[in-house]
Image (cartoon, rainbow, N blue to C red):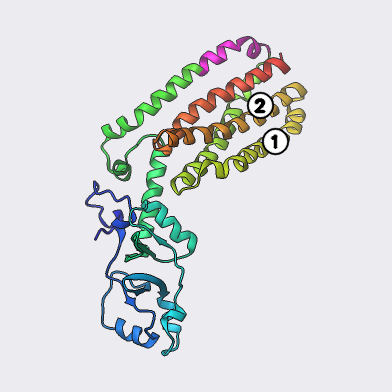
Amino acid sequence: MATGYYENASRPNLVFETAAEHISENVPRAAPEDRASAVIQALQGRSFDCATGVAICKDGRLAGLLSIERLLAAHGDELVSALMDSDPPVVAPGLDQELAAWKAVRQGESSLAVVDEDGQFLGLIPPHRLLSVLLWEHEEDLARLGGFLQDAATARTSSQETVLRRWWHRLPWLLLGLAGAILAADVLEAFEDQLQATVALAFFIPGVVYLADAVGTQTETLVVRGLSVGVSIGQVLWRELLTGLLVGISLSAAFLPLGIWWWHDHRLAITVSLSLLAACSTATLVAMALPWLFHRLGRDPAFASGPLATVIQDLLSLIIYLAIARVLVV
């Protein structure tokens, strides 16, 4: 049986993707009519791949799971059918490994039962493998959100890459950022008259762009993680949009009195405040739209969302800020 990435570091090309790859078949089993004392006696002197719980089976079908802790605390003559969890979380062997691991976490289980479509018990996914999956997927998401790796196997060995491969994986997204910087320069040139008339406008460009990026990054992380564990965009859409709006309102309200007091310019302070409100709200929308689009196209939403969203949001924030400044300041 497979043992998970962190136990097979010498085999970096080995890729596990489904629950079936992590099953341990050699686990304690008992029948519903067995008594606790008999089950404990049957476990003594035997070695198991996973002994966090006892699979209670009837005719090969899973009837329930009994934790070792509850078994050891039970009276010897108690039936395991009265002690077991008769409705434990189960997964199909073909379920994505990350969805399986998160299901165990949400249910508070130390191991996870795998059954086929007929309800036949196939084995347990032990806790160390569940942890391996979560660590593996977390590392992969971070690598792809960073925009320098796409495939899972390469993402997991990125820290051991040669200098040339590191350069090759990162360069495309940096070139995209360079293109964005050139477009941003064109945007600034289009608003050159406003910037010359009110030089103080330039002081706030980095702050508006940074805060919008920060809001977008928070939303991207939430959305991509949600998509990876089966949470659809529709389930977070309105809450996240409202959150982005509230964040924008909060930042705008916090800056307005400070800007008026510090720079003694009401129009400048209002411009920056409105820009923060609009840019942060837009950042939330962009950060949800791109992962959703890539997900609908069958592409990994983590792969392109981060770098691409950064370029788009920077340009939008800049345009929003300077457009508002044209109306209110100049």
Tell which residue pokes out farthest to the left in this image.
10
Whole-percent x, y for residue 106 in the image: 49, 59
Q: Residue furthest bottom?
A: 77
Q: Is residue 206 above or below residue 47?
A: above
Evaluate whether residue 265 shows in this view: no
Q: Left or right: 196 with respect to 56?
A: right
Secondary structure found at label 2:
helix
Is residue 181 visible in the rendered image? The answer is yes
Q: Residue at x 62, y 40 (%)?
A: 238
Quick check: 71 above or below 323? below
Upstream in the sequence, badge 1 or badge 2?
1
Left or right of 291? Residue 135 is left
Looking at the picture, which amino acid does disc 1 mark? Ile
Q: Quadrant of residue 199?
A: top right
Residue at horizontal 57%, vertical 43%?
236
The boundaries of the magenta stretch are: 184-197
Quarter of the image that includes the N terminus: bottom left
**Mark identifier at residue 217:** none
Residue at figure coordinates x 65%, y 20% from the top left: 201
Few, some or many C-alpha atoms within 10 Å of disc 1 (few <14, some 14-19, many ≥20)? some
Name the spot of residue 87 as percent of width and height, x first: 46, 68
The secondary structure that dominates the magenta segment is helix
Instruction: Using the image, tell me which numbered label, if any, was put on residue 249.
Output: 1
Element under disc 1: helix
Q: Is residue 250 above or below residue 100?
A: above
Q: Which residue is mark 2?
A: 275
Say which of 88 and 142 sits in front. Answer: 88
The residue type indicated by label 2 comes to Ser
